[in-house]
Image (cartoon, helix red, strand yellow):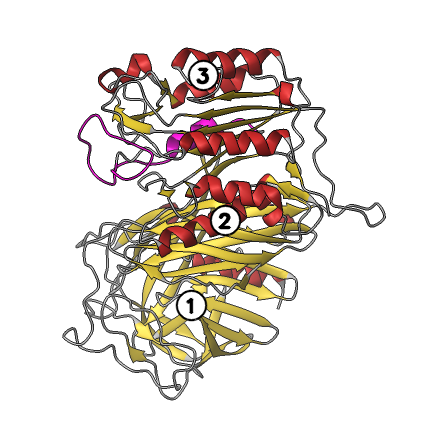
Amino acid sequence: MPWRTLVGLSLLAVVAAPAAASDERVPPPGPGGRPGPRPAAPVEAAERPAYAIGHKWFLTDGTYELKRLDGRDYVFVGPGRELRLTPELAVAGVRRGADYVDFRPPPRLKWPLRAGLWGSGETNWRVSRLPKNVAGLSTAGGLRVTWQVRAPEDVTVPAGRFTAWRIDYEVFQTGAGGRQTPVWQFSTWYAPAVRQLVKADDDGTGWLSFEVASIEATPPAMATGPTPPPPPATTPPVATPAPPARVAPPTPSGDTEAPRIVINYPPADIKLESERIVVLGVVSDNVGVDRVQVTVNGVEVPQERGMEARGRAIRVPATLRPGDNVIEITATDKAGNVAQVVRTITRVVAVAPPSPAPVVKTANRWAVIIGVGTYANPTIPRLRYATRDAEAMYRFLTTKGGYPKDNVLLLTDGAGQKPTLQNIRRALGEFLYRKPGREDMVLIYYAGHGAPEVDTAGNETDGLAKYLIPMDAEPESLYSTALPMDEIQRIFARIPAERIVMLLDTCYSGTAGGRTFMRQQIRAGSINDQFLERLTRSRGRVIITASGPNEVALESSELGHGVFTYFLLQGLAGKADRNGDGVVTVSELYEYVEEQVDRKARAEGGRQRPLMKGEVEGTLPLAQVGK
């Protein structure tokens, strides 16, 4: 099949998410001002069909058979090609040899079809290559599509004459400043009598043009309910109606909010030498997550973890091939809403003879270590292990870690320099401003309380300012006596070193039992982590926090440390050296700590999952542990 037809069929996929419907007495003009068709039969609505394994679709270029199910998508296999259809008859992807067109997330029409129903929305697409006449388009990016269902009309194809619903589409590519460039106009026809698409046309340009050659003797069954996922791939090839509502719990109705996908690692567009990584993140939703699918270069990767109330953790090992690798995380909630995050990771393969993996060269290493266990104000809860954590980190860095003692400042309750607000500002804003050079690396470690406060300036999307709490802080006056996280951004800008890693064994939820307290009453679960995104916006700045935004950074009497710091020390000492090259990198450390802290917190009945934000070029070594 020519590439033109391959891309043409794929355009069925660019259907926007459901939008508000409206009924019209007179069919409105079609795309480009085309007059709407006149109804051929008094049909009021068309119901969505349901296909079963073995169903055949006879197009003019060959027979397509439903061979398997990929998640909720049908996979039709034809002559040298695979065509993936969603249950709503939108195309999720087309593949033929090395050529492919993929749409993520797969968009959907709204069923039942009826005249006047319309929608507009965005979808992402990836194309292996483009024909010359659309060479100006990007092979990866977003499209906006408007679509409208017209009244039924008679259509004649090689398989016969059918009354079919016409669906008109206008496709735009969104550019800088929201500018929209028209790309395609096309139409498809769905015939309720045979329960399938019978025709597609794009005004003679050839992009989207096919007709049904013949019809299978037994038409597919009608689907029931609000677009349930297809049956598992092992289901016998029989179309079975959905169970009654009294047997299966009803799908949440009225919900249009898509799941939220947070990918903690890897960062977007990062370049790595590693062949194997672990994809880390979490999916959450207001009504519950139904399915999470992770693919690497188009191949689904099995996941280890299951459901957790209204969220699901992502921890998926991935093998990278040399060059670009596309990681796609697609989440569907129980109301059928879909969200997706796509990451492109480049694996750089050295051409030199076999040798240890290359790392970022650093002229020197500098560190500021802060631990606050006892506070001057007795209303601030004392922390048992924050000072001990900081002292252990200092000992490790100045011995096995390879940091010269003159390059490391320690601020704790028992050290010569106390962790007061003035001393912390001097250490971060003056010592790290004057000492390190551009090629050096800076490590900042903090163990102590964090606290939220209502953001009266309106800078935070969650309405809460976050603070690190020094030894001399006053809970009723955090603005003037604590260190706002926004100031960390200014401190980062002052430090000349191109590579800064900040490790925070603290939290901001205000929940009792961890390294946080709350001066004001705030709504539970209202904190987000967007402030960390802002702090690490500049390349070369990485922050690893002990927990998620609404979780607690735990201390453990069994470990004698904060849980996060204990596994930081274990990882830096060598347990995070996943590839065995004698060097612990920031990526290796985070992968190790995220897994171990999460596991330990669960074992103790808590919830704590470290986050990493930001990125650096190359592989950044934090500790040399030897082989």
**Is 159 placed above or below 324 here?**
below
**Element carrying mark 1:** loop
Q: Please report the bounds of the magenta region as a residue range.
A: 511-539
Mark 1 vs 2, N-terminal side: 1
Residue at 55 percent of width and 60 percent of height: 298
Please, what secondary structure does the residue beneath circle 3 have? Answer: helix
Q: Give the Cα separation between the discs numbered 2 and 3.
A: 39 Å
Look at the image and tell me whether residue 141 can be seen: no
Which badge, 1 or 3, is on the more N-terminal residue?
1
Q: Residue type at mark 1?
A: Gly
Amino acid on which the number 2 mark rests in the picture: Val
In reply to whether residue 478 is colored magenta, the answer given is no
- Residue 596 in percent (x, y) is at 47, 51
- According to the picture, the residue beneath numbered tag 3 turns out to be 424
Task: Indicate whether 221 appears above or below 387.
Answer: below
For discs 1 and 3, the disc positioned in front in the rendered view: 3
Direction from residue 35 to residue 616 in the image, left or right = right
Q: Nearer the viewer, residue 207 or 427?
A: 427
Residue highlighted by disc 2: 342
Q: CA distance from mark 1 to mark 3?
A: 52 Å
Amino acid at dot 3: Ile
56, 205: nearer the viewer: 56
Q: Residue furthest front?
A: 414
| Residue ranking furthest to the right | 353
